[in-house]
Each structure stands twice: as C-alpha cells, then as structure tokens.
Image (spheres, rainbow, N blue to C red):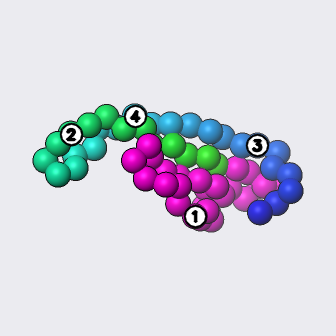
Amino acid sequence: MESIYPIVFLDALHAKIREGGLVSGNAVHIAMDVRADGAKEIYSLGSNRAKAQTPAHVE
C-alpha cells in the first residue's frame, strides 16, 4: 500500500443475487485507487453478504 493516493473511488452496485433458490437484493461495494504513477488498484471488493477480498492489481 502507498501512503498517498491522489484519487480514491468508492461505489456500490445493487444487484439481485440468487442463493439457495432465493433471490435477494444485495449491495456490492468497491474501493478503487489511483496511485501517483497512474496505476489503478482495486483496494477492496465485497458485498454485504461477504467480507472484503484482498487487494488485486488492475492493469
């Protein structure tokens, strides 16, 4: 992780998710940052049903 991120995006997408034959509305959260060198990283990705995943590099 960097100590400074010039840009940080926080967003949520509301989606219908089928689980065990039931359909429910859930929010999928994403936190994306842009480093000083312009590289983009997914900092956090998860839903209100699951804990956040580990960060992944995005080209």
> For the point 73% across and 51% down, which residue is it?
34
- Mark 4 lies on a secondary structure that is strand
Q: Residues within 10 Å of mark 3 (few under 14, many from 20)?
A: few
Earlier in the chain: of badge 4 and badge 1, it is 4
Q: Amino acid at mark 3?
A: Ile
Earlier in the chain: of badge 1 and badge 2, it is 2
Q: Amino acid at mark 2?
A: Val
> For the point 50% across and 37% down, which residue is it?
12
Which residue matches tag 2? 23
Which residue matches tag 1? 54
Q: Nearer the viewer, mark 3 or mark 4?
A: 4
Earlier in the chain: of badge 3 and badge 1, it is 3
Q: Position of residue 13 (x, y in %)?
A: 45, 37
Which residue matches tag 4? 14
Q: Amino acid at mark 4?
A: His
Q: CA distance from mark 3 to mark 1?
A: 19 Å
**Residue 37 in view in this figure:** no
**Residue 53 in view in this figure:** yes
Give residue 7's mark. Answer: 3
